Image (cartoon, rainbow, N blue to C red):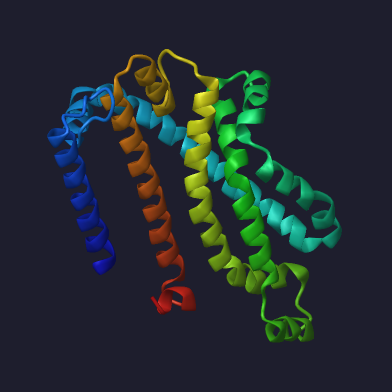
Amino acid sequence: MQQYVLPVLLAAFLIGLWQLWTVAAQVPSYLVPSPVDIAKTLVADFGLLMGALWVTVKITVLAFLSAAVLGVLIAFAFVQSRWIEAAFFPYAVLLQVTPIVAIAPLIIVWVKDPTASLVVCATLVALFPIISNTTVGLRSVHPGLAAYFQLQRASRWQVLLRLRIPSALPYFFAGLRISGGLALIGAVVAEFVAGTGGTGTGLAYQILQSGYQLNIPRLFAALVLISLTGVAVFAALACLTRWALGGWHESELNR
């Protein structure tokens, strides 16, 4: 309970200081809106912001699922063959270190469907942690257990299914927690780069439009929704980790 109460109390204290400062210093809302102004904007523009939030969440979820599936498959291939890992792992690193803002315009041009192009961009951002963590996990088997499976003449499929995958689960879920936040970041950055208007636009477009129109309360309201979405994604993945590992793995039993 303490791990939830203390952050909430600290957040309430900081928001209270923010409100007092904006009122006492008479800070204009077009510079720094007060928490009350942001809350009013959330209520007044609820339909617009919720529609944009749904678009961003949809792209984030699709990108996260795509990254999870692709990352696991690539990690399995790396573990089965050192040659494959040596040949392709540098390219996975290359994707990680290449700024998405540099390649997103090309992806948006090549992939005609706007939603699909944004999903591809966000997937590239979220992919590497799952590849890296899952690969490390699949290789982090106890030497004694590996020798026992070899002594029992277990097949490669049996070693993978009964030894490597259970050993890799903590690493895999750690990668998922990182990838979930990166998928959201990738979705928002891709929306910024796309900069398309009209219906079906996400929160990033609302931030851009609010900045152009000096509607700073709406800009802050969109930022709040993005932050809350990130927290919700991390919390959901943390709950999934506890559900999957809580009954048997030391990382959750010792919490």
Quadrant of the snapshot with the N terminus: bottom left
Residue at the limit of the structure toward the front, as seen here: 25
Total marks placed = 0
Q: Is residue 39 left or right of residue 92?
A: left
Which residue appears at 73% of the width and 67% of the height?
A: 157
The reply to whether residue 249 is in sight is no
Q: Is residue 88 left or right of residue 239?
A: right
Which residue appears at 47% of the width and 47% of the height?
A: 181
The reply to whether residue 8 is in sight is yes
Q: Check the image and report above or below for 240 versus 92.
A: below
Which residue appears at 67% of the width and 76% of the height?
A: 141
Q: Position of residue 249 (x, y in %)?
A: 49, 76
**Residue 238 sits in quarter:** bottom left
Q: Position of residue 16 (x, y in %)?
A: 16, 46
| Residue placed most toward the observer, 63 or 195 | 195
Q: Position of residue 123 (x, y in %)?
A: 59, 39
Quadrant of the snapshot with the C terminus: bottom left
Which residue appears at 47% of the width and 74% of the height?
A: 251
Q: Check the image and report above or below for 106 versus 167.
A: above
Q: Position of residue 168 (x, y in %)?
A: 61, 67
